[in-house]
Image (spheres, rainbow, N blue to C red):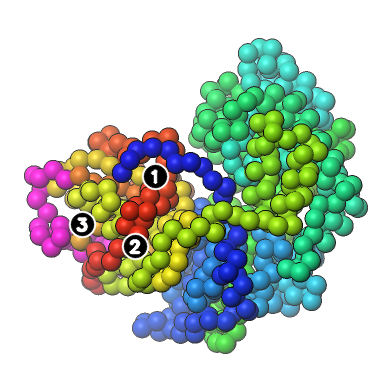
């Protein structure tokens, strides 16, 4: 593969128009899976918006409900992913989650989801939070999980070291930036590259306007828009939003080129004491304190006076239930029991995994950490703004925000372009057809693995001419369909945020890599929490014995049917996420250091595994045929 950086395009936020035009209710949806597996357990599929939900929640659910056979799949953080599943004729998972949410986005899924408004779990919520998700009909199909807190993260120790007061309003915020800049320290910086940063800073700097009567009225109209009635920006609130954002960029000393800054380029200087403040969440502040010893605190998005300060929040995810569940009373009861558990105090603590969150449920007390001590007034006075997060708002915020940053637009030009796009949004990634797939492969995990995941790894390995490819954590987010594939649909096949490495390893070292990925360690750490997180291999086959539920022992290893030669040297492609396997709150199984030092980045300049499969398919024009890469045996 040519090692280069691809031209960046706007992130996806819409399914191809023709596909959506053909989506009527749940037409084409397959029959719901049976309520029992061969062992008599009720089967429940649960799609997670990100692998972060695999930290503590999924093993806790399996332990709490031993009579339920769970299938956990890492999906995608967009409603369009689920719209695409339905348009392709796939069944909706029993429980689905999504962080990026608006009623505007979710409207076309309504007929496929249960109305939870009269359920027992809905009764555990404060009504004001549920009303945000209530449709005009009165139905509530999405329940919000505890809230992330987003704001300005400050290194408190730096403020104390240089005797600079922590700001309490906007003018003091700018004064603190200026004071640090005079010392040669960047006062404020953030990862402007991402759509979520553009959206959150744009809304964050103008929350008083967005929460005014005019702002909330416009938002209600926008969330209730229909295909025949697209709602444009209003002429009262939104011009002020862009005027304040234009001033905000100047005040924080935005420099040309900063629009390309990604997470590492902004977080590392903060860790090193070269930047005093960055945009972040309370969860990140907690993590930095625990892992790096930096006393980081969250500050609000500042208003002219402290009474105008607000904290930006968003649910860690929203949960919904497939309407197909209603067809089986036993399964429906089991799903409702799972929802009650997830939204209990214990369940939400497992979702939060020790980080600072705010709960929407009565009688749920999740104690705040020190990260939130400087936004307690905002929390107590209910100055909690829930971001407007439709998929088109994400995409347009990035596009227009970057054009403001580069000087192409002033506030007036930004308002005009944003307004034009919001009533006729088009996503280039959802329009261009890259190829037509001729054979479908399921993502269901059987006795020989996932055909879709195997197809992915075979495709990547073939194009890169490596002898072995090994995917770890989960690799496939979706089945492989027959039909046309756009760029966005290609990206949805592979799980998000994987790294890609290559290395030359002896057969004995390959055996050790597989041992790292399969076997339970002496301290009890387990790299495989669920079957569909087993290593996905290409060019290599292996057997495992399941000694007890979720615990495996590695057996034979072969290469294309021939025994692995311990003394031979093989080229190996590794695809996965180190954090998932290594971090103590996940699997706590670090890769042996001597094996890690032998691998090298296969690609440069932020080239991702998704871009890798995209380039591979430009060459192959097909997802290649899967192979039976694993054999699972039962035993002691």
- Left or right of 171, for residue 522: left
The one nearer the camera, 464 or 163, is 464
Q: In this view, does 286 lie above or below 352?
A: above
Q: What residue is shown with label 1?
A: 499
- Lateral position of residue 549 relative to residue 81, left or right: left
Circle 2 — which element? Answer: loop
Which residue appears at 64% of the width and 43% of the height? 398
Q: Is mark 3 on a helix, strand or loop?
A: loop
Q: Is residue 52 magenta?
A: no
| Residue 593 seen anywhere in this rendered image of the structure | no
Q: Which mark is residue 623?
A: 2
Residue range corresponding to the magenta coloring: 543-570
Where in the figure is residue 101, as x and y percent of width and height? 66, 59
How many angstroms separate mark 1 from mark 2 (CA)?
20 Å
Instruction: Point out the tag, 1 or 2, that comes first from the N-terminus.
Output: 1
Residue 84 at x, y percent in the picture: 54, 68
Residue drawn at (51%, 33%), measured in percent from left and top? 264
From the viewer's perspective, is the residue at label 1 or at label 2 nearer? Answer: 2
Badge 2 local density, few (<14 within 10 Å), some, or many (20+)? many
């Amino acid at each position: 593969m040519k090692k280069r950086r691809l031209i960046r395009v706007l992130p996806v936020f819409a399914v191809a128009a023709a596909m959506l035009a053909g989506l009527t209710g749940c037409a084409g949806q397959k029959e719901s899976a049976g309520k029992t597996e061969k062992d008599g357990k009720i089967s429940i599929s649960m799609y997670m918006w990100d692998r972060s939900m695999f930290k503590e929640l999924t093993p806790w659910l399996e332990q709490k409900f031993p009579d339920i056979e769970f299938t956990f799949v890492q999906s995608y953080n967009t409603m369009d992913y689920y719209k695409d599943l339905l348009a392709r004729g796939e069944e909706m998972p029993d429980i689905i989650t999504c962080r990026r949410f608006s009623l505007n986005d979710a409207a076309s899924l309504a007929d496929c989801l249960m109305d939870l408004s009269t359920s027992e779990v809905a009764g555990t919520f404060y009504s004001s939070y549920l009303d945000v998700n209530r449709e005009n009909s009165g139905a509530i199909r999405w329940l919000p999980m505890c809230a992330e807190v987003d704001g300005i993260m400050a290194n408190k120790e730096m403020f104390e070291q240089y005797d600079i007061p922590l700001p309490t309003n906007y003018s003091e915020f700018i004064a603190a930036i200026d004071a640090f800049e005079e010392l040669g320290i960047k006062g404020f910086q953030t990862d402007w590259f991402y759509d979520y940063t553009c959206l959150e800073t744009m809304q964050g700097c103008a929350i008083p306007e967005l929460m005014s009567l005019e702002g909330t009225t416009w938002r209600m109209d926008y969330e209730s828009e229909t295909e025949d009635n697209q709602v444009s920006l209003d002429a009262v609130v939104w011009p002020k939003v862009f005027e304040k954002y234009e001033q905000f960029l100047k005040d924080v000393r935005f420099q040309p080129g900063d629009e390309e800054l990604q997470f590492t380029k902004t977080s590392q200087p903060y860790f090193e004491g070269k930047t005093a403040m960055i945009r972040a969440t309370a969860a990140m502040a907690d993590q930095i304190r625990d892992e790096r010893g930096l006393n980081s605190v969250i500050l609000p998005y500042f208003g002219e006076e402290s009474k105008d300060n607000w904290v930006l929040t968003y649910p860690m995810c929203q949960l919904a239930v497939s309407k197909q569940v209603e067809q089986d009373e036993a399964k429906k009861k089991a799903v409702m029991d799972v929802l009650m558990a997830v939204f209990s105090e214990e369940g939400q603590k497992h979702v939060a995994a020790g980080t600072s969150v705010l709960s929407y449920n009565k009688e749920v007390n999740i104690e705040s950490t020190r990260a939130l001590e400087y936004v307690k007034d905002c929390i107590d006075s209910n100055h909690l703004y829930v971001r407007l997060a439709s998929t088109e708002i994400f995409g347009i915020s990035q596009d227009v925000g970057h054009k403001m940053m580069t000087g192409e637009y002033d506030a007036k030009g930004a308002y005009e372009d944003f307004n034009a796009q919001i009533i006729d949004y088009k996503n280039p990634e959802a329009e261009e057809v890259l190829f037509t797939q001729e054979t479908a492969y399921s993502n269901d995990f059987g006795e020989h693995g996932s055909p879709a995941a195997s197809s992915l790894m075979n495709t990547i390995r073939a194009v890169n001419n490596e002898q072995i490819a090994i995917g770890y954590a989960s690799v496939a987010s979706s089945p492989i369909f027959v039909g046309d594939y756009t760029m966005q649909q290609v990206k949805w096949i592979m799980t998000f945020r994987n790294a890609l490495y290559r290395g030359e390893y002896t057969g004995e070292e390959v055996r050790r890599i597989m041992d790292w990925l399969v076997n339970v360690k002496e301290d009890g750490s387990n790299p495989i929490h669920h079957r569909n997180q087993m290593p996905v291999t290409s060019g290599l086959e292996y057997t495992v014995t399941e000694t007890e539920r979720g615990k495996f022992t590695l057996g034979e290893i072969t290469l294309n049917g021939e025994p692995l030669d311990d003394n031979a040297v093989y080229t190996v492609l590794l695809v996965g996420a180190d954090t998932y396997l290594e971090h103590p709150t996940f699997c706590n199984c670090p890769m042996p250091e001597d094996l890690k030092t032998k691998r090298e980045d296969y690609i440069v300049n932020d080239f991702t595994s998704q871009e890798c499969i995209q380039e591979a398919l430009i060459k192959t024009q097909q997802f290649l045929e899967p192979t039976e890469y694993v054999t699972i045996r039962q035993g002691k």
